[in-house]
Amino acid sequence: MSHENYERLLARARALPAIPTAVAHPCDESSLTGAVDAAQMGLIAPILVGPVARIRGVAAQAGLDISRYEIVDTPHSHASAAEAVRLVREGRAECLMKGSLHTDELMAAVVAHEDGLRTARRISHCFVMDVPAYDMPLIVSDAAVNIAPTLEEKVDIVQNAIDLGHALGLGEVRVAILSATETVNPKVPSTVEAAALCKMADRGQITGGILDGPLALDNAINLQAAAIKKIASPVAGRANVLIVPDLEAGNMLAKSLTFLAGADAAGIVMGAKVPVILTSRADSVTARLASCAVAVLVAHGRRETIAKAVQ
């Protein structure tokens, strides 16, 4: 199946220098292969963090040549997460990549108060989805980190997604705040929060994107559905960012697009000091490489921001 959006994404990322990336605990074939494939494509310069013997054993079994990559030895997955985060804090890595450890274990190290990678921004997850029937990349947030976000937390979730949209070169970032209906109903809290987020954008509390909501999924991504409901806005029918009410809705939406619509889903965590690449053993090779490409574009955008601040 063709994934032209991802192919364009990969082409942009490959034109940039590889990003030093701490790969936390790549101790199974899929995670180590993903890191090696991304390195061979010129996306990342991996630092493999984990038990040396296990990593080399996996490489030998999978027929992977890892002789050119630095390995930082750790005794177990918990230590791998902490050490990978430390490499980022020391400036040796500009990106963090999940290996075969649990997501919760890696994120615990990322959000640690004293020695983690927190910023003033709430950390949130974004899927960058390549849906064959949709003519542009689609960002879905948050489907993996924030379970039942408050309105205050949704402000950061939206801003993170907008920032990601700009890093991906989407141009005009059109954000649909999703609910079950396109009208504000006090009995449906997500519709009230959607309206509040849109007004906050009007007041400059959220910047860089065009917001509309509440919108049901159909009139967020289908122009005909929006026209039938007589919804006139720059977002309705052509959103490229979908903000879901909670993790359950986001998870079901992302998996529906993946397994029913043939979409690929690249995963990244925004809001930390560096982008965090989250991949799954169920991900396709294309999705794994796309996750790395997304992180590369975000990391290079961060470099440019820091350089401008120093000038």
Image: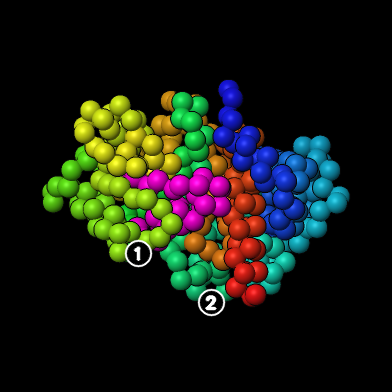
Q: What residue type is labelled 1?
A: Gly
Q: Is 34 placed above or below 256 here?
A: below
The residue singled out by tag 2 in the image is 114
Give the extent of the magenta segment.
154-178
Q: In which quarter of the image is the N terminus?
A: top right
Query: At x 35% / y 65%, what residue is drawn?
Result: 205
Query: At x 51% / y 69%, what residue is drawn?
Result: 118
Foreground of the two, 137 or 115: 137
| Residue 217 drawn in magenta | no
Foreground of the two, 218 or 75: 218
Query: At x 30% / y 47%, what residue is drawn?
Result: 212
Instruction: State the mark number for residue 204.
Output: 1
Foreground of the two, 198 or 104: 198
| Residue 166 drawn in magenta | yes
Question: Toward which corner of the image does residue 61 lie, by quadrant?
Answer: top right
Q: Quadrant of the C terminus?
A: bottom right
Question: Toward which corner of the image does residue 78 lie, by quadrant?
Answer: bottom right
